[in-house]
Image (tube, rainbow, N blue to C red):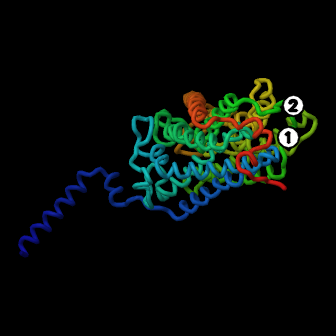
Amino acid sequence: MRIRTGWMGLLSSGMVALTAVLMPASAWAQAAAPLKADTGDTAWVLISSALVLAMLAPGLALFYGGLVRSKNVLGTIMQSFMILAVVSLLWVLFGYSLAFGPDKGGVIGGVDWIGLNGVGAEPHPSYGPTIPHQAFMLFQLMFAAITPALITGAFAERKRFSAMVLFSALWSVLVYVPLAHWIWGGGWLAKMGALDFAGGAVVHISSGAAALVCALVLGHRRGYGTDYMAPHNLPMTLLGTGLLWFGWFGFNGGSALAANGVAVSAIVATHTAAAMAALMWCLVEWLHRGKPTVLGVASGAVAGLATVTPAAGYIGAFPAMVIGFFAGLVCYFAIVWKGRFGYDDSLDVVGIHGVGGILGILATGLFASKAINAGGADGLFYGNPGQFGVQALTAVVTAVFSAVGSYVILKIVDGVTGLRIQPDEEATGLDLSQHNERAYS
């Protein structure tokens, strides 16, 4: 028995030694030292998830709620909260797996992680090697929820609640999930080298394109161009703007997936661009209309935040200032010229998020620098003109895919539930006609 044990021990030692010789050094290091979650990085991503949640509920809900007429404020706020609930469940059930699961031909993720099977406390090497896999899933869930909620501003005050719920659910699965995989989940645009740090294409261009299609398909609000449709509560909108600005630090800074220098750089760029865009919008409006407005400052800040989002983790403070300058200028005139095109984008989703997202994606191709983020790429101004072409392609593909997908989904929803509320319900308002409640007595 002792002789057999000795031979077995010798054989075992020999196998270990042979494995050490034959196994590549990197594989041996990985086997010897599995990925381990860092408490600081994990805490930052969890806090960032909460910040993005605050952007949606109550941030976006209050921002949009203050912009509509008083008879529609509850219905508008309700849309944000319902989308948060529906998309969260879809994301956990299968959305996350299809967006970030093992790549299938560059088009979609696999079904390996349906119901969060295999998504636990261990880090994933591709999605934050120092945070639990489930923390990354939660952070991305908030992005998936806020994106269709942005679209609701385009059809505010006139869409049937059941149609809104069905459209948001289908759009989340059929449009958002594939785009997230193409750019963030290892899909074909990611393989081409597309840069989108925190959602300029995935979130803002996609929602802006969908918003334009929704506004065109649903048509004008009753009384558009003749009735008084000014925001009913600008203090509420300003409160929502403050929460959006606050939460955007997690939206962009959290996309570094670690409490590190890239996160700090992203937050500095985010704040700088927002401040510049708010100031620029205010000045342009002052010169153009004769008075600066509260709504203008709020709109400018959000335009700056949306525009800098894809570039935030790849640029320094001065490029962020330049991006904010053009965000305030270009997005302002995009909204001014909205009337010339004749569509009723109730809360200016197209002009702020769509135009801002395109501007930001292109600016990333100009200003991105590996000196800021070694994991990114250099842009045109740093000697890599090809990156600008990739960014332009990303913008076009995202806009077209979202627009076509949104149109098809709208037609499906119209056949199932109908899209618009009845004229008498629109005159009464969403609050009473859809929910039998009043915001104000």
The outermost residue toward the bottom is: 2
Q: Position of residue 323 (x, y in %)?
A: 71, 38
Residue type of the residue flagged with mark 2: Thr
In this orientation, which residue lies closer to the viewer: 358 or 435?
435
Q: Residue at x 78, y 32 (%)?
A: 335
Helix, strand or loop for disc 1: loop
Q: Position of residue 255 (x, y in %)?
A: 58, 50
In this orientation, which residue lies closer to the viewer: 390 or 166?
166
The outermost residue toward the right is: 290
* CB under 8 Å between discs 1 and 2: no
The quarter holding residue 394 reads top right
Residue occupied by mark 1: 230
Residue occupied by mark 2: 226
Q: Residue at x 57, y 50 (%)?
A: 86
Task: Please rate how many residues cluster around mark 2, counting C-alpha atoms within 10 Å: few if below 14, some from 14 to 19, many from 20.
Answer: few
Helix, strand or loop for disc 2: loop
Count up the numbered dots.
2
* 233 relative position to 412: left or right: right
Q: Residue at x 78, y 53 (%)?
A: 438
Q: Which mark is residue 179?
A: none
Task: Work out how far the residue at label 1 is from the one at label 2, CA to CA, in angstroms.
Answer: 12 Å
In this orientation, which residue lies closer to the viewer: 350 or 316?
350
Q: Position of residue 227 (x, y in %)?
A: 86, 34
Residue type of the residue flagged with mark 1: Ala
Q: Residue at x 40, y 55 (%)?
A: 118
The outermost residue toward the front is: 424
**From the image, which quarter does the N terminus lie in?**
bottom left
Instruction: Determine if residue 278 is in view.
Output: yes
* 433 relative position to 6: left or right: right
